[in-house]
Amino acid sequence: MTSGTIVFGTLVLAVTVLGFLAARWGHPNLNRLDEWALGGRRFGTIVSWFLLGGDLYTAYTFIAVPALAYGAGALAFFAVPYATIAYPFVFLVMSRFWTVAKRRGYVTTADFVRDRYGNRVLELAVAATGVIAVMPYIALQLIGMQVVIERAGVAPTHAAAVLAPVVAFVLLAAYTFTSGLRAPASIAFVKDALIYITVIAAIIIIPARLGGWAHVFAAAQTALAAAPKPGSILPAPPSYLAYASLAFGSALALFIYPHSITSVLSAKSAGVIRRNCALLPLYTLLLGFLALLGYCALAAGIHASNPQSAIPDLFERYFPSWFVGVAFAAIVVGALVPAAIMAIGAANLFASNILRTFRPNEERPAIETRSARILALVVLCGGLLIATRIKPAFAIDFQLLGGAWILQIFPAVVLGLYTRRLHPQALLLGWAAGMLAATWMAVSTNFSAVFPLRAGGTTIAGYLALYALIVNLACAALFTWAFNATGIEAGGDLTAPSDYTA
Amino acid sequence: MGKRAWYWLLLIPFVATLWPPFYARSKPALFGFPFFYWYQFAWVILTALLVLVVYLATREPHGD
């Protein structure tokens, strides 16, 4: 057992204890859904910054994006504009959503859709989409953990190395069940400290050992060009649309995921969210530098059989053993925090919007919290199932698939914040068309996110989520016109214009 | 011109980063970083500053 193993084991254990202790934070009544799921809507700017950072910058950032840079080159850097333009968008949209949710006591996006459109089927569709879309994203977190745990030396035999992520996963489920959102919120502090220390050390030490950044870029270019499927450190013109559409589609999807909504609604004011839109881009710089570590791995001549292990391999080569322990703990904890929030967010949807629809007469708060707890476990198991069943070329494709699904609630949720002109039945048809289109395109490309659209003799490759959203919006607009023309009732709206502004 | 006009500033990062022909080039390099990279990193910081400006300009005096 090396010093790295001891450091790694100690840190992960400490975080687990913290997860359970979080139940006592502020002496909450954890049987109430908004206490368990939203931390009582009391988090200020700093707690929210850590929580949102812990929630949005995940194994996607630490493992999947660098793996794509290592395997495919420039395309991976779409994640930088993605995590940049998301914030001006969130600044406008999510502070409006927070305001109406606070005013009317919503815990989920589907709660809003129910009141806004008076349509239970649309509410169910929005809730079910959230639950399904978050599962591949959880699968990505589990893969990130697995890559690191296999290397950390905590497992003496191969069988134990396979089992270790399952153990981490059971612990995660247990403290999520006990403490609710307070668990990831308190662990997020430790997570971020570990991540910043690791990344700052990495970007100081590793490029210097490799002869400086200019050399890293040149060596990465040579390695990418020589690969069986040649890549480059600059995107070629045919991939411009894929690059921009991946960034734009991901940015639109980011904050309508259930876990982002959970973190947004736990803020104590709309101002907390707006301030965080100016502060969170600090994590985006971190993301960019982590992606560049994928190039460092190329420059260092690391030959990873699986691109996802390029970064762990790089750390093992250049860091002393004890610091490898810190770095690996950072990655595991960095995957545990979002996985916990994702499970909570999806469980909220299930308990508030799906179960309630079928069991409307039962007493609400107690049953909702109890079922939310159990459903958080179910959602985590769904993630585990996807992680073991679907094998895309890059782990990032899991997240991009989740994005393609979640984006189909964009018309009902985001456009719904601004206009009630789209007919609820038309939104439902648009949603169904978008979900079918997204799933069909994903399956036809073997779960790659970029779909080659053939139109008029030319092929336009773009993020399939946006193509599906266009299908969705076209259907919603067309059927709104048709339903209005034939006089089909558009349902009621329980929200008032004053609910949207502070 | 009301406070809402400030929100137009938030469109700038979309135009600047969603059109790769603007920046998919290696020169001029900065600190060893090809233009493609440092340009996008710079927009992370510029966007945060723009959001901050809009936040300060549109903030209600007594609320938050």
Image (cartoon, coloured by chain):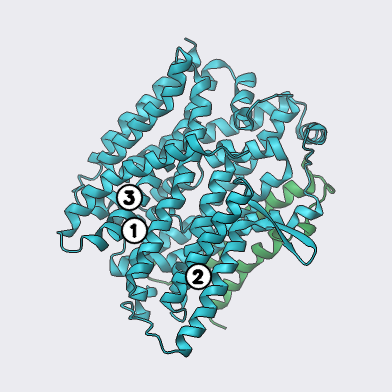
Chain colours: A cyan, B green
Q: How many angstroms separate mark 1 from mark 2 (CA)?
A: 34 Å
Point out the residue furthest to the right here: B27
> Could you say which quadrant of the image residue A107 lies in?
bottom left
**Looking at the image, is mark 1 or mark 3 earlier in the sequence?**
1
Foreground mark, 1 or 3, reads 3
**Looking at the image, is mark 2 or mark 3 earlier in the sequence?**
3
- The percent coordinates of residue A155 (x first, y second) are 44, 16
Mark 2 lies on residue: A430
Q: Amino acid at mark 2?
A: Gly
Report the chain holding disc 1.
A
| Disc ID at residue A268 | 1
Q: Are marks 2 and 3 on the same chain?
A: yes
Mark 3 lies on residue: A347
Q: Is residue A212 left or right of residue A409?
A: right
**Looking at the image, is mark 1 or mark 2 earlier in the sequence?**
1
Q: Is residue A20 visible?
A: yes
Q: Amino acid at mark 1?
A: Lys
Q: Are marks 1 and 3 on the same chain?
A: yes
- The percent coordinates of residue A55 (x first, y second) are 45, 46
Who's the residue at 74% across and 24% down the image? A301
Foreground mark, 2 or 3, reads 2
Badge 2 element? helix
Q: Amino acid at mark 3?
A: Ala
Q: Quadrant of the C terminus of chain A?
A: bottom left
Badge 1 element? loop
Q: Are marks 1 and 2 on the same chain?
A: yes
